[in-house]
Amino acid sequence: MFVQQGLQDKVMSVSKWHPSAKNRLIYANGELHRLPSSISSVFKKMQPFQKPLYYAGLRDIFAKRGPMGDESIHSFVKRRFGPDVAEYLIDPLVRGICAGDCREISVNFLLKELKETEMKKKKSKPELARKAEHEGWSVWSLQGGLETLIDSMVDHLCNNGTEIKYDTKITSIELQGKKARIKMESGEEIETEQLISAIPAISLAPLLKKSHPEVSKILEDIKCVTVVASDNDPPLETFMGTSGRCINGGYRYQSTTPIELEEICKFSLSKTLGINEEPHRNSVQILKDSIPQSVGHNGRVNTIDEIISKESLPIIVTGASYKGVSVNDCVLNGIRSAENLLAR
Ligand SMILES: Cc1cc2nc3c(=O)[nH]c(=O)nc-3n(C[C@H](O)[C@H](O)[C@H](O)COP(=O)(O)OP(=O)(O)OC[C@H]3O[C@@H](n4cnc5c(N)ncnc54)[C@H](O)[C@@H]3O)c2cc1C
């Protein structure tokens, strides 16, 4: 996609050998601990783990099969790799990705995608993906941030005759036979034979309440957590100009005020990194109901797909609420939605 958009020269990467990729720390039992980053460290006993990590691999060989159906990521990993891996590796990792508690997040929701990716490994990879693998990228971004991708796509679409309406709130969607009628706050209406909805499930649910209460109810059950991102720039002289980003999330932040959140972020930086000075800049953004995660998630999404297919409804749902939250997932699922539409 980057190559199609002519953005390959704007991709920035950090290799897995860079100190920032090798020195990953977790805060546990009141202290920061460096995570194992080499093969030899897997054979050493490192705090906060009770045993060297290779024990976890051995345990997996003898692990009993879990319950049929869905379970939480924590229960899955604890059963297969032991409580240490669940507590000190997977819990912080999942908090970083999903801003939530791995005891409440569905194993199918996050790990099923990994499995699918693994199955597809044999396909030939695009040049940029091969470069990423060859150079051992740990993380990547674009010059100017990911917004560069959005700007480039908007240019591409507008230059090819697509009309984009900004700041337009949709107030209802009626599914009438083979047509979808979209009503907007401005009073404008659009009728279409096929609609791809990329708005969050929680926002789509009320729009479909009248015309399809059953789908609306399932959409309503796709629960999301609120994520809080706080940019906190400590004084230059203290931290060599390093910018700190503190991301908090989960059900416990659902009703916390911005001022309380700013204090929580400052407290976290003081407790974990010893930064006590007032930051030069501090901005808190509350992203309400932004990440879906509950156990049983995939079942709900499959039911929605089944109803749409069985009743030939003129709608396809896509976006972070359904089959993966990462930007990569959203792009991939957007492409799949367009392909599904063309195959109808
Ligand atoms: C703090 C944070 C950090 C993240 N970091 C990363 C990361 O590093 N890497 C990564 O891959 N992913 C990351 N993610 C996840 C990823 O960014 C999101 O999951 C993804 O961008 C969601 O895209 P989306 O288009 O599905 O939803 P959104 O971006 O939420 O878009 C939905 C749009 O629908 C609009 N909408 C809602 N209701 C209506 C209505 N009634 N009428 C019209 N429009 C409506 C909204 O205004 C919004 O513009 C992060 C997420 C968060 C919250």
Image (cartoon, rainbow, N blue to C red):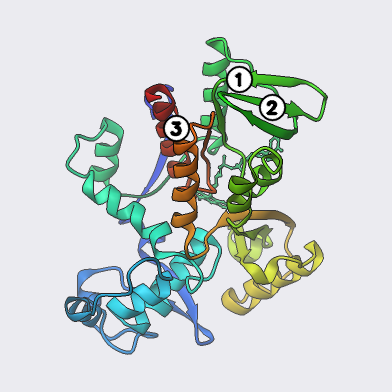
- In-image side of 53 versus 233 (left or right): left
Residue 134 in view of the camera = yes
Please tell me in which quadrant of the rendered image residue 286 appears. bottom right
Q: Could you tell me which residue is drawn at 44 percent across and 66 percent down?
A: 93
User: Where 290 falls versus 212 (above or below)?
Assistant: below
Quarter of the image with the C terminus in it = top left
- In-image side of 193 versus 296 (left or right): right
Q: Looking at the image, which is closer to me, 150 or 83?
A: 83
- Spatial CA span between label 1 and label 2: 8 Å
In terms of secondary structure, where does tag 1 sit?
strand
Residue 192 position, x and y percent, is: 60, 20
Going by the numbered disc 3, the residue's amino acid type is Ser
Residue 1 in view of the camera = no
Q: Name the residue under label 3.
A: 337
Please tell me in which quadrant of the rendered image residue 223 appears. bottom right
Q: Mark 2 points at which residue?
A: 182
Residue 133 position, x and y percent, is: 25, 45
In terms of secondary structure, where does tag 3 sit?
helix
Q: Mark 1 points at which residue?
A: 192
- In-image side of 105 versus 213 (left or right): left
Residues marked 2 and 3 touching at CB (< 8 Å): no
Going by the numbered disc 2, the residue's amino acid type is Ile
